[in-house]
Amino acid sequence: MSDLTQLTIAEARDRLRARDISATDLTEACLSAIDGADRLNAFVHKTPEIALERARAADARLGQGDAPALCGVPLGIKDLFCTEGVASQAASRILQGFRPEYESTVTRQLADAGAVMLGKLNMDEFAMGSSNETSTYGNAVNPWKRQDDAADLTPGGSSGGSAAAVAAGLCLGATGTDTGGSIRQPAAFTGIVGMKPTYGRCSRWGIIAFASSLDQAGPMTRTVRDAAIMLQAMAGHDPKDSTSADLAVPDFEAMLTGDIRGKRIGVPREYRMEGMPAEIEALWQQGAAMLRDAGAEIVDISLPHTEYALPAYYVIAPAEASSNLARYDGVRYGHRATLGPGEGITEMYEKTRAEGFGPEVQRRVMIGTYVLSAGFYDAYYNRARKVRTLIKRDFETVFADGVDAILTPTTPSAAFGLGEMAEADPVQMYLNDVFTVTVNLAGLPGISVPAGRDRQGLPLGLQLIGKPWEEGDLLNTACALERAAGFVSRPEKWW
Amino acid sequence: MSTIDTDTARQVASLARIRVAEDDLPALAGELSNILTFMERLNEVDVDDVEPMTSVTPMRLKRRADEVTEGNMQDRILSNAPDAREGFFAVPKVVE
């Protein structure tokens, strides 16, 4: 029974349609795997009743034939997505008890396609973090361990619960969101596939906002094909999100031929960072060789403003966050502090936000407040937005020169131990995003593909960056890389 | 090298409406200073004649008719309020 949880989405779809397995059996297998994995702290709000109800509905629909690809497929949903009647609190104390009266567009589309929601997944508070250690629910734990070392590792962040759940076989796929790398970095740390689509491909409506000009939802799955299938159901124009693109969504799965002959793949010299572990460098070269063997042409390229992406991001993202998070004031939803005698509305705001936000969120809201304040707006915020223009121009230049996709490492290291960064400067943690954050600043699609393991046995990922709106072509290149890398390892069950 | 002193940290916390204990202000000031120093690398970039980015995808924002499309759901809007009375959000007295 439990091997049902190891099916890919594509396999499950085919077997569900063939009536070889039922959605109810598949859902029950996942629910039982979830109940046996509390140690990973991935699912933080379980919704078995909803799951079984949707599974039964999916079985009925499958019985009638012509069911969509995701019909009956059990998925996990990041806690950042508002789900009607189900706790949705962005892993923050300030949204304790919040049960939305509405459903996010992405989760609505998944439900309409017949997908089965198993529950809500752990994450960093308001998606601010790279290790899932800022969550009000406590740490999510990576199902992978170093060889001969029992220490718990981070699954990455912010979509740490999603990554842990998919890697551990608790669900067949999960939604993530990515503002600076929050889908791709945890995917790399857990040996799965994670894709951030082009900005505007998936509606942001009903997803709790962090930095609105950077946030994008995307799929986290075990294979590239599954990412294509899931993205298909998540994507599309939504009148409720004015930045969602009114463009047709192609059939992504149909574009997975694996044929990349004649494609030009750029390798950016600026991503060769000082102090980068030799294993990461070696993996990157192997990845380039695999694509070359598959018939692609590898070209050296330059993205000259790369080193300024991280500081620009850490101006723009907190600035937008300080504005977006102003709504958490203890009036309309979530936590409100208890007031002492004589305390008024200002004290209510200040105490509510001090109690409700964790340290990293407070830090970013204050940085954002500072860079937007009178006298500093031009020096920080406007300058960062100008640098962002230059970063986007770097990519436009190489694409105009005929490059089809760009190959980089996803992260500068493998998963690190929970607590290992506790004493580090916050800026050290921010360096996790160094290879992924440029993609958000330029609004491009990016995907992390598991490509190898380090000498301690931990998974490592390679990132492919594509042209705007060409997710199909990018997925096809990722498919070729996945095939050549042949990464099939799964973590050994210890939980 | 940017430095935020304790007074500035107090002022930022107040603007952000986050209560920070007086004893915690020096540590906060130090953290914020480190982050700002990191950001100041942006000063190395020549940004003359560069437009600040307003939209990452070159598309016009859509317009729609200015009309009510949903409404009459007061109970649902108030359902998550920490304190709602007589159809309103309730807050401590603001005006004497």
Image (cartoon, coloured by chain):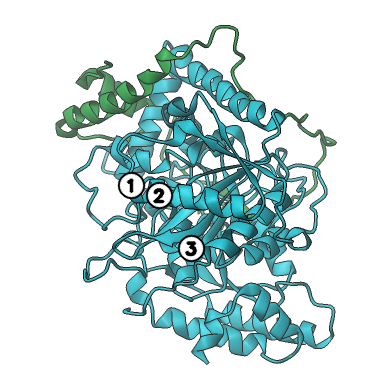
Instruction: Give the left or right position of residue B42, taking residue B1 as reference.
Output: right
Q: Residues within 10 Å of mark 3 (few under 14, many from 20)?
A: many
Q: CA distance from mark 1 to mark 2?
A: 6 Å
Look at the numbered discs 1 and 2 and tell me whether their residues touch, using CB distance below 8 Å: yes
Quadrant of residue A139 within the rendered picture:
bottom left
Instruction: Give the left or right position of residue A73, taking residue B96 as reference.
Output: right
Residue that appears at 64% across and 73% down: A9
The three-letter code of the residue at mark 2 reads: Ala
The three-letter code of the residue at mark 3 reads: Ser
The quarter of the rendered structure image containing the N terminus of chain B is top left
Q: Which residue is mark 2?
A: A282
Q: Earlier in the sequence, mark 3 or mark 1?
A: 3
Q: Chain of mark 1?
A: A
Chain coloured green here? B
Residue A333 seen by the camera: no
Q: Which residue is mark 3?
A: A162
Q: Chain of mark 2?
A: A
Q: Is residue A334 above or below residue A468?
A: below
Q: Which residue is mark 1?
A: A278
Which mark lies nearer to you, 3 or 1?
1
- Residue A106 x %, y %: 66, 57
Q: How many marks?
A: 3
Look at the numbered discs 3 and 1 and tell me whether their residues touch, using CB distance below 8 Å: no
Both marks 3 and 1 on one chain: yes
**Tint of chain A:** cyan
- Residue B13 x %, y %: 32, 29
Look at the numbered discs 3 and 2 and tell me whether their residues touch, using CB distance below 8 Å: no
Q: Chain of mark 3?
A: A
